[in-house]
Amino acid sequence: MKVYNTLSKSKEEFVPVEEGKVKMYVCGPTVYNYIHIGNARPMIVFDTVRRYFEYKGYDVNYVSNFTDVDDKIIKKAIEEGTTADVISKRYIEECKKDMAGMNVKPATKHPLATEEIGGMIEMIQKLINDGYAYEKNGTVYFRTRQFKDYGKLSHKNLDDLQSGGRSLLVTGEDEKEDPLDFVLWKPKKEGEPAWVSPWCDGRPGWHIECSVMSKKYLGEQIDIHAGGEDLVFPHHENEIAQSEAANGKEFSKYWMHNAFLNIDNHKMSKSLGNFRTVREISEQYDLQVLRFFMLSAHYRSPLNFSADLMEASKNGLDRIVTAVANLKHLLGATTVETLKEEEKALLEKTNEFVAGFEAAMDDDFNTADAVSSVFELVKHANTTANGESSKEYLQGLLDVILKLTDVLGLIVEKEEELLAEDIEKLIEERQAARKAKNFQRADEIRNELLEKGIILEDTREGVKWKKA
Ligand code: AMP
Ligand code: ZN
């Protein structure tokens, strides 16, 4: 299995730190608003990476944080006349709803920065003790030049950074020893959330949060650290400096970064007015369409969001959903049980599509090609399954399609809706059961309907039903 590693700028064979296990950390969103469709890209992409590792038999420990202390959260809290805590809790809940809609599995652990401050203070203290950090008037800085490998991820050279960073000196950070140094801890300002520390009441810098949460939940050395490509520098470069200086070990073996999502070929931004939240998209489309759209491109290619492409994705997904519904319909109708002689080779042929799917995913998670293999499989099913097919053949086709779409996290089975006539039939049966004093059966029917979202009401005019 090959994974593109930003560290080496090349595809490398995946070899886990510990056999059979994958420890991965994905930088999560800053929670001050509904997540936008750009934030949805890493969520969907790395959830798919996780699912593929699980499909391959790995035990995946997947950690993704919520950044719940940040200038933007504080600003929003002030605007609304409330606390940062209220804002972050609200948008974490909303984010989880969006994730569920996109069928992104909950992480093994979703740590919150505000609940891990103790660990951050500990790591900062260790960095100070070891000469990698220093305090000036309550602010603690990382001594960037002290970490010899600085720049190895973003492939930047310290002297180029030095000339680019000079402007920082005039923006009031002149107490730094070096313009390249970055903040680990900063003093509180009036009205901001703050924690007690050996240096001052204040809060951590953003980069230290991830170094600490990754270490706490995954250990000092992990397999994959991931996020959007904007995080390569400075966020991930700084995380490497902090973690490797503090732990004396390579932090993450592989660094994966998704390319950006643009809208109608423009960068998405509030000022351009082309900013879309996942919630807005959900009003127009099933979020499975958004997931399908994201997976229709390779994660390292820029992706352009447009109404046309969303329509095309809707049609693409529909093709799979329809094929699955058709197979289920045929399964319900056929009377032939066992695989027929001529079906053996046809079922065997599905292995070719599975092999194509796996080859695509093994090549740095090429979901675009993996989706093509699913389409070939669907075509094979559509052209070979019919009213004469055996149950075994239809079930075989269905199983393979569901196995592959599940790796992509696509929900392709339509919820079966009860038809009005079926409901009426069950109500009649319930009435008959009651008459025969078989109350157990009557209750069973009521509960069965309730599970499917149908509520029964016993009225004077008889039994009425409504949708929950
Ligand atoms: P943020 O809340 O800005 O820290 O972003 C959370 C995650 O979303 C990070 O991994 C970002 O790199 C990623 N991200 C933000 N905007 C986009 C975008 N337009 N396209 C793809 N990924 C993005
Ligand atoms: Zn991070």
Image (tube, helix red, strand yellow):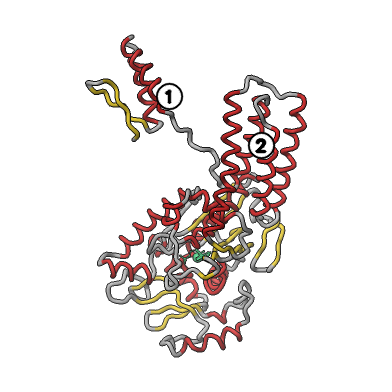
Q: Secondary structure at mark 1?
A: helix
Q: Residue at x 43, y 60 (%)?
A: 277
**Is residue 322 rendered to the left or right of residue 115?**
right
Q: Position of residue 264 (x, y in %)?
A: 53, 66
Q: Position of residue 381 (x, y in %)?
A: 67, 36
Alpha carbon distance from label 2 to label 1: 29 Å
Q: Residue at x 50, y 73 (%)?
A: 127
**Along the viewing direction, whichever of 226 and 127 lies nearer the viewer:** 226
Q: Residue at x 62, y 71 (%)?
A: 153
Instruction: Please say if 437 is above or below 183.
Output: above
Residue that badge 2 annotates: 382
**Along the viewing direction, whichever of 426 and 2 lies nearer the viewer:** 426
Q: Quadrant of residue 154?
A: bottom right
Q: Secondary structure at mark 2?
A: helix
Instruction: Please say if 426 is above or below 101.
Output: above
Residue reaching furthest to the bottom: 170
**Is residue 278 rendered to the left or right of residue 257?**
left
> Is label 1 within 8 A of ligand 1 (CB to nearest ligand atom)?
no
Residue that badge 1 annotates: 422
**Along the viewing direction, whichever of 86 and 117 lies nearer the viewer:** 86
Residue 111 marker: none
Q: Amino acid at mark 1?
A: Asp
Q: Amino acid at mark 2?
A: Asn
Does the image show residue 211? no
